[in-house]
Image (cartoon, rainbow, N blue to C red):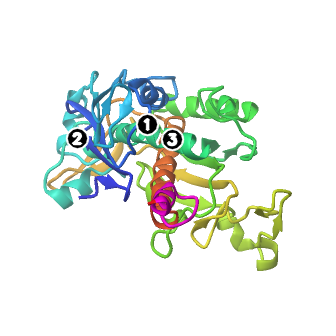
């Protein structure tokens, strides 16, 4: 029903914003991976609410519990279930929204599709659902780091019309985490923070763009034609709440160039590896990773729920006025950074497992092939 993502590394998220809790079941994780709750918690802490004045003031510790799939600090190869209990729900804040639709929110479409919805904080459409994604992404990142040394770093690139100057090939996680905006350009970050502060005081919201780079991605990830790597990345990132656009490499700006200007010329480096002199392809060609850095961008709209009075209708179609209550992010971007990283990690981990299963089973370097020769 749309709650499961992935092929070999499969994740299913569950729970509602103001219910008993939220979480995820991860199926397909290889056995004997060192894993503990602290590995997951550090990513959840980056996503949790209440971490700065730029985020929702809801106070949730978001403490994770691993309730299956791990024994004596190692994964078993069986489904890993992770639960985060809701500690600070205030469903009464949303009583008015039981009958009245918030503009640009999922209230009307959920009612139209299912005929019923959990109106407490948006229920399943709330960004609180992403706790499960971030928890699963922490496991995927550990696999990617251990097996291939893959590094994934996302950061706020633009807030409204304020854009940062960042080199995706050299940016560090430390620089990203150095300020509450999660923008590694310090001067621009201060301008972004001032703008979000002003919007917050107006009970309004604002959007922008997150850029993400994945380094050390091996050649060969991606399964043409319908499971191209950029296609799966696009689906993953466009499934995030408030996402409205996806670009990879040159993106839409590439339409302004000619083929000669846009093409990435090949060369062989000193180690004999095939490289590209430029990276307008964004690390993917023909739907398959080419070994260069994967660089992508995701556009996020302004948070739909705001405190200003807006015209809307109720379930009966009667016109009314709504000034939404509750606790909401004036800008989703700082908390969306770990969400973007998590979804990129889930896609890359799934494709890494798929590539190994299809393309390395019969190759000489495969451990299984070596065993077969010795028999």
- Residue receiving disc 1: 33
Taking the image as shown, residue 102 lies to the left or right of residue 348, namely left
The residue tagged with tag 3: helix, strand or loop?
helix
- The residue shown at (76%, 79%) is 259
Residue at 77% across, 61% down: 273
Residue 41 location, x and y as percent?
43, 26
The residue carrying pointer 2 sits among few (fewer than 14), some (14 to 19) or many (20 or more) residues within 10 Å by Cα, namely: many
Which of these two is toward me, 321 or 112? 112
Q: Which residue is mark 3?
A: 141
Dot 2: what SS?
Answer: helix
Q: Which residue is more in the foreground, 179 or 311?
A: 179
The image position of residue 327, as x and y in percent, is 36, 29
Q: Quadrant of the C terminus?
A: bottom left
- Which mark, by number, is residue 20? none
Q: Are marks 2 and 1 in contact (CB under 8 Å)?
A: no
Residue at figure coordinates x 30%, y 40% from the top left: 24
Residue 322 lies, with reference to residue 54, above or below; the image says below
Q: Quadrant of the N terminus?
A: bottom left
Q: Nearer the viewer, residue 302 or 166?
A: 166
Magenta segment range?
361-374
Q: Residues within 10 Å of mark 1 (few under 14, many from 20)?
A: some
- Give coordinates of residue 205: x percent, y percent: 48, 39
Question: Pointer 2: what residue?
Answer: 97
């Amino acid at each position: 029903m749309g709650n499961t993502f992935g092929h070999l590394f499969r994740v299913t998220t569950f729970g509602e914003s103001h219910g008993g809790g939220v979480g995820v079941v991860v199926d397909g994780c290889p056995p004997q991976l060192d894993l503990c709750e602290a590995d997951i918690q550090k990513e959840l802490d980056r996503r949790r609410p209440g971490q700065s004045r730029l985020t929702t003031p809801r106070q949730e510790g978001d403490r994770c519990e691993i309730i299956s799939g791990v024994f004596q600090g190692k994964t078993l190869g069986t489904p890993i279930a992770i639960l985060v209990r809701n500690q600070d729900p205030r469903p009464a804040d949303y009583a008015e929204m039981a009958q009245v639709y918030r503009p640009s929110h999922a209230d009307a479409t959920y009612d139209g599709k299912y005929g019923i919805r959990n109106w407490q904080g948006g229920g399943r459409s709330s960004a609180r659902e992403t706790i499960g994604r971030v928890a699963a992404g922490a496991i995927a990142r550990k696999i990617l780091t251990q097996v291939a040394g893959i590094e994934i770093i996302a950061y706020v690139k633009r807030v409204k019309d304020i854009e940062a100057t960042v080199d995706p090939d050299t940016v560090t996680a430390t620089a990203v985490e150095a300020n509450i905006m999660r923008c590694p350009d310090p001067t621009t970050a201060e301008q972004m923070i001032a703008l979000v502060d002003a919007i917050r005081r107006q009970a309004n919201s604002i959007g922008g763009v997150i850029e993400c780079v994945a380094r050390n991605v091996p050649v060969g990830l991606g399964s043409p034609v319908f499971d191209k790597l950029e296609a799966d990345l696009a689906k993953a990132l466009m499934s995030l709440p408030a996402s409205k656009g996806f670009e990879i490499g040159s993106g839409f700006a590439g339409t302004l160039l000619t083929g000669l200007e846009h093409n990435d010329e090949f060369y062989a480096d000193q180690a004999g590896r095939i490289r590209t002199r430029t990276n307008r392809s964004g690390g993917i060609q023909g739907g398959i990773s080419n070994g260069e850095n994967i660089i992508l961008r995701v556009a996020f709209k302004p948070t739909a729920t705001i405190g200003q009075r807006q015209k809307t209708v109720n379930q009966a179609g009667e016109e009314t006025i709504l000034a939404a209550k509750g606790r909401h992010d004036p800008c989703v971007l700082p908390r969306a950074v770990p969400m973007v990283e998590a979804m990129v990690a889930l896609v890359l981990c799934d494709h890494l497992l798929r590539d190994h299963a299809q393309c390395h089973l019969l190759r000489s370097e495969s451990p299984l092939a070596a065993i077969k020769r010795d028999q």
